Image (tube, rainbow, N blue to C red):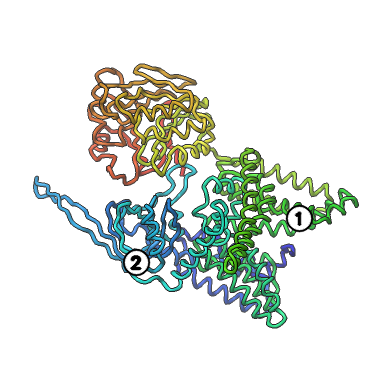
Amino acid sequence: MKHLRFNDLLRFPALIAAPGLMVGILVNDYGYFPLWFSLPVSVTALLLILIFKLKDQNRLIPLLALLFGFASGAATISVSNASFQSNPLGKLKQSDADITAKISEIRVMTYEKISFTGEVSLIRYDSTAVDTMGKKRTKRHFTVTKKFTEPPTLLFQIKNPDTALYKSFKQQLLPGREISLQGRYANPLNRRNPGGFDYAEYLKRERISAIVYVYPDSTYNISGQPDLIAGSIYSFRQSIGDKIDQLHDKYTAPILKGLIIADRSTIDPEIMQNYIDTGIAHILAVSGFNVAVIYLITLLLFQRLKPYSRGAELFARILILFLFLILTQFQVTVVRAVVMFSVYSLLKYSGRETTGWNTLSITIILILLVNPQDLFSTSFQLSVAAVVGLFLAENIKSEVFRVWRGYFGEKSKKLLVSKPFFWVAEMVLVTLFVQLIMLPFLVVYFGRVTLLSIPANIIAVPLSSFMLVNGILTLFLSLISNFLASLSAAVSGLANSIIDYTIGFLRHTNWGTIEIYDSTAFEAFAFYALIALSLILISAANSFKKKSLIVLATAVCILLSHIMLQTPLLKPEENYIITVDVDQGDCYILKTASGEVWLIDAGVLGPTFDTGEAIIIPLLKRFGIEKIQHAFVSHYDLDHAGGMISLMKKGLIKQLNLPPPDPADTKEVALFSILAKYGKHKIYKTGDLFSANGLSLKVFNQTPETGAKSNSRSGVFMVNFATHSVLFTGDLDRKGEKALMETESNLRSEILKVSHHGSSTGTSRALLEEVKPAFALISAGVGNRYRHPSQKVLQRLEEANTETFRTDLEGCIILQLDEGSIKKVNWR
């Protein structure tokens, strides 16, 4: 491949237009430039480019290409954003909604989960209103029916469907058909905690307005005819998946479905994590790697047509690629690869001069003009970055091998020309460059990079390429002979076993993985600027010694820039109280300037969601917290104690402090037994005092008679640090509050953790009079069905002149406790 040169910017306007297009999309995503301005500018710039090209006057073309790209990006994102309906129901959540929709795409069809999108035409639900006439208040019930002339797209999810429903849906659920069902409408949530996933942003880019969690006992009515094209494609895709399941073992079939039809829904989570942690998840992403294999197959299949009709041969190859694109449901990575191969083939066929960089630029322009939202797709970003890495590796490969020969002399030539060495060296070089260019994206999205990708790719890439080809061959053989197909399938199974063993072994070595957090956009810019500068300097250097010094200097500069540009969210010398957003649950992290970290409660454990695993552990990594010295459970409700199990299993807690379980409550005893078996623990009692490194906690654990409600027995903690006091009241109700005030004479605290998520059963006026808090913390789920926090409690807090912070409104709340002052940290 030719090196990218400055003169190429004059010959290939797409090289400038593509970056301009991306910048235009990013800038105008916030709506700075109206369509009436950006569209005429785009058209004018394009016309001027064509005029100057015809007159062979190229000097102004780069500037015009940049203007065209920027204005086109601004125009396309304006149109795309204007057509999106956000929160079509106009409310956060709505239970018991009857919904009618036209099925668009079936995303997941397994025994664990069914997921599909649909264009909604009608939503109906019951509501109430209170009419006030004088002192008389009358509750009125009515039905709300909302019809949509421009149907929004909603995501429907059914968890753990029964066997009958799964089999019925697998036959009847087809694109184009109409479905009526009942479920809970929910507006997707934005990022709730530092480093968390912004689900609302993700669905917005997917053009999905809201989610419907379908009830297990919902009635279903599926009617109408499936869409002729989309329905046929889906049925064909399903039949291929079923055939793969029939021919292969239960470990190989899911991998092959991922490779051939981009269906990763049945891959075991542990195996998927192995692929991710060893840096070879791109194999299952159905990216350019898979398309390249298909492209090579088409070259072999249709090369005999070339002497007779070059156009027919080209048409046949592109047709196969687009059929593969349709089969994989237009995944953005496949779109990028198919369009790029097609553009390259068409340019070569037409006799027009091009380079890999120009082809990539044209591909980016075509994709983003059709759907500018793809720019925000992680898959698209990683796919483009990987191609850039491949191009750079290809450009520098000959230079590296030339330096090798020059440094090690003639003796190295025999080794260098040997095919095994050349292949391994090329694979190492390509993997390094791809990882290097993808580094900022890997850090931002995954918080880690891994050197395990080098040995993993050397083993997995050729074997998975073979599995892809052999998997397709097996499908064709099954049409001729089941015996031959079974033999072919067994070979794929062997290849898959080798990959599984290799990546499983590599992952469990715990070597080569570097976790990096607190990365910024400016740091990414500095990284790419340093890489670009080093490549320019290396190409100009005339000795191996100079080139080596440039590489070393670049590495040092990147490391120094990372250290200098780091902006840790929690300053080491400060004290913090962190209210973690765990939806309808409680979790609080206390961190002192000396590095002491304590935890009070750990959120929810449910049938399909573990707060400890999904939220708290990633958040601790984000904060750079490796150990929790003390953890406290206020009581044994699962929305407080459930997430603690994962933390104990991972060995993150040095000592777990538990309330005495009620012997009459079998659930409490069972949960206590589970928590106690995973590490050091202590049963606390009223009056116990815990203190270390400027942090102290005193237990006010009121335990009324055996058999009393769990909330009445909730542990209460008075915490003191950094000259401030905080009262944690768990789920304490009025009965518990009364007992607390009768036995404790001094409850005065600056900060109050409001009990039971702001329920009206607690936080009485009497308690507020005793505590006199300046600040209140409320942990409650967004739009929760209990309607926490209660308006009565909020009114009491307002009357007490207490400033209130709520997770349902703000997400995670971080308070920095300085000596004599408390301030909120803006982490977004």
Instruction: Locate the N terminus by quadrant.
Output: bottom right
- Judging depth in this view, the residue of 330 and 362 nearest the camera is 330
In the displayed structure, 590 sits above or below 557; it is above
Q: To which quarter of the image does residue 89 belong?
A: bottom left
Identified by mark 2, the residue type is: Glu
Q: Residue drawn at (61%, 53%), measured in percent from left and top? A: 493
Left or right side of 215 for 357: right
Q: Residues within 10 Å of mark 2 (few under 14, many from 20)?
A: many
Left or right side of 74 for 564: right
Q: Position of residue 422 (x, y in %)?
A: 79, 55
Q: Position of residue 181 (x, y in %)?
A: 31, 59
Q: To which quarter of the image does residue 658 belong?
A: top left
- Judging depth in this view, the residue of 347 and 345 nearest the camera is 345
Q: Position of residue 601 (x, y in %)?
A: 40, 31
Q: Residue furthest bottom?
A: 308
Label drawn at residue 178: 2
Secondary structure under badge 2? strand
Answer whether residue 380 is visible to the viewer in this image: no
Identified by mark 1, the residue type is: Trp
Label drawn at residue 423: 1
Q: Residue drawn at (62%, 71%), measured in percent from left and top? A: 342
In the displayed structure, 375 sits above or below 223; it is above
